[in-house]
Image (cartoon, coloured by chain):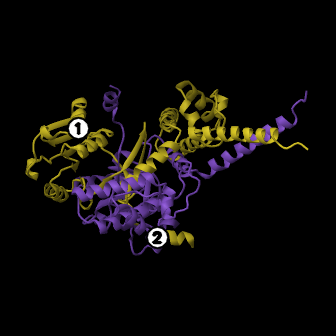
Chain colours: A purple, B yellow
Amino acid sequence: MADDQKIQSLGGGSLLIAWQLKGKRVLIVGGGEVASQRIKSILHTDALIIVVAPSKGLHPQAKKFIELRKDRITYVDHTVQTVEDLELDGIHMVLTALDEHSLSHEIVSVCRSIRIPVNAADIPDLCDFHFNAQMRDGPLQIAFSTNGNGPRMAALVRNRVQNALSGHEGEAITKVGILRNKLKGRAPGVGGKVGKERMQWMTGVCNAWEMEDLAKLDETMMDNLLDEGWEKGRYIPAAKDLGIKQKKNLGWAVPQHVAVHTTAAFVLGVITATVLLTFRPRH
Amino acid sequence: MADDQKIQSLGGGSLLIAWQLKGKRVLIVGGGEVASQRIKSILHTDALIIVVAPSKGLHPQAKKFIELRKDRITYVDHTVQTVEDLELDGIHMVLTALDEHSLSHEIVSVCRSIRIPVNAADIPDLCDFHFNAQMRDGPLQIAFSTNGNGPRMAALVRNRVQNALSGHEGEAITKVGILRNKLKGRAPGVGGKVGKERMQWMTGVCNAWEMEDLAKLDETMMDNLLDEGWEKGRYIPAAKDLGIKQKKNLGWAVPQHVAVHTTAAFVLGVITATVLLTFRPRH
């Protein structure tokens, strides 16, 4: 029943997705502060970026991106007056970051008519999609959306999450990716029985090992893991059996501030008891 | 210099975005387990969903969604043989979850030609975008992408984050959204000086208040906050001045397991000292 109610109340959110831009062309119109943020977001992907903006208004950060990433950014020094100034042929996505909202409206309207995904900064109603507060650690990307209820809050939640993670997650994910490719090399094939077995074994390893131990895997250890585990009846060896020194395993990641406060609490306990016992009234 | 290097190494990721689907039509082809997950993802938004799949192969969860959300889901009982079986007119997004990869290929190819964003389950190369591990707490949505390096790892990071959050974040964001609307009511206008002032004051409140205190705000308190703060020179009152009882403020959210372990460490300290002092050799 509770489950049914939950289903009936689903709604009101966005679809958070990881858009694939490798080799695609993204047009950014504008060169101010927001445009700089957009350039940075797109540089995280492997898209080709075209920035159209007058050089006199170019934000220092935008300038820096354009200078340092000539391999990825084509800069067109031009003040856009009308959508006809833009070459939309072969463009996969358009982002406007303009003070002139009427020009943004015009660009969005043309993009919509030819079905190019578009985002107009500061005009939520014109956006096919919104940007989010984000964090990145190697292959790990985390996005925080408040669905328009306060961008500052998204950043605060991100900070909270950043403090809670150990910082080894990205490295662990990288290593799991390499291990998975090694396993595919030993047991190739798409889908079917072997695909299922691979998935089960990989899931088993990810579940059994601490994230911090996965992060320590090197190529030799991975080969050992595959020899001693996968090859021997799909067994899952413990990290310590492969010579990976474990730090005290408390069953979860211990962020630094937690370790500090647990230690502080212990010391405080010792002091409290010592004081009470030493200065207790003697009968 | 370090900054320059960082810019030069940006890449390899996806663009994590919040796609807006309110009132848009999303076509899901297939009715199995993955299709059920897709239906659930889309139900989180306010899209209209069309599910095309034969009733005999319908997954129990898919069946449940279709029964319970007739307001949002149109179900077509049909075994799709070719892309021509599908009505793509007016469709904003297409998701396939089919065993027949060749049919998925055909559908994707047609969608691409008419620029409909498309995702084909299990065939990453055919996807304009990928789905992610997610969590939701009211207006707060968090997405976790490993960029294809291991879906299990994304779920593990999500669990870690879920444990680290206090559970009050969604409520706090809801309240901030209401407060922001109330403020806009008092000081209306888009952009310009008033827009900037509103943003600064809201940011000030979000930064100064604990998330847990924001979550406790009710309508009366919000009005007080606006009367005593915004109206009196854009001042930012403390939570306790508005009668919001604060729990001990340690400067961050204390997840339950941390509280438990800090207490345990203190008790252990007391016991250790007591034992040592009580049984110490007496000279």
Chain that bears disc 2: B
Do marks 2 and 1 share a subunit? Answer: yes
Q: Quadrant of residue A234?
A: bottom left
Q: Name above or below for residue A227 compared with residue B212.
A: below
Tell me the distance, in whole angstroms, between the alpha carbons under discs 2 and 1: 43 Å
Q: Name above or below for residue A205 compared with residue B45.
A: below
Asked whether, in this view, residue A42 is left or right of residue A253, the answer is left
Total marks shown come to 2
Chain that bears disc 1: B
Q: Is residue A59 visible?
A: no
Residue at image x 8%, y 48%?
Answer: B85
Residue at image x 56%, y 34%?
Answer: B214
Q: Which residue, given by chain and number where applicable, does mark 1 sit on? A: B62
Q: Is residue B240 visible?
A: yes
- Number of the label disc, if any, that sits on residue B9: 2
Query: In this view of the protein, which residue sits in the foreground, A200 or A260?
Result: A200
Residue at image x 21%, y 53%?
Answer: B116
Query: In which quadrant of the rendered image does the N terminus of chain B lie?
Result: bottom right
The disc, 2 or 1, on the residue closer to the chain's N-terminal end is: 2
Q: Amino acid at mark 2?
A: Ser
Q: Residues within 10 Å of mark 2 (few under 14, many from 20)?
A: few
Q: Amino acid at mark 1?
A: Ala
Q: Name above or below for residue B38 compared with residue A61.
A: above
Asked whether, in this view, residue A187 is left or right of residue B110, the answer is right
Query: In this view of the protein, which residue sits in the foreground, A241 or A262?
Result: A241
Quick one: SS at disc 2?
A: helix
Q: Position of residue B108 (x, y in %)?
A: 18, 57
Q: Position of residue A62 (x, y in %)?
A: 47, 66
Asked whether, in this view, residue B246 is left or right of residue A281, the answer is left
Q: Position of residue A258 (x, y in %)?
A: 62, 47
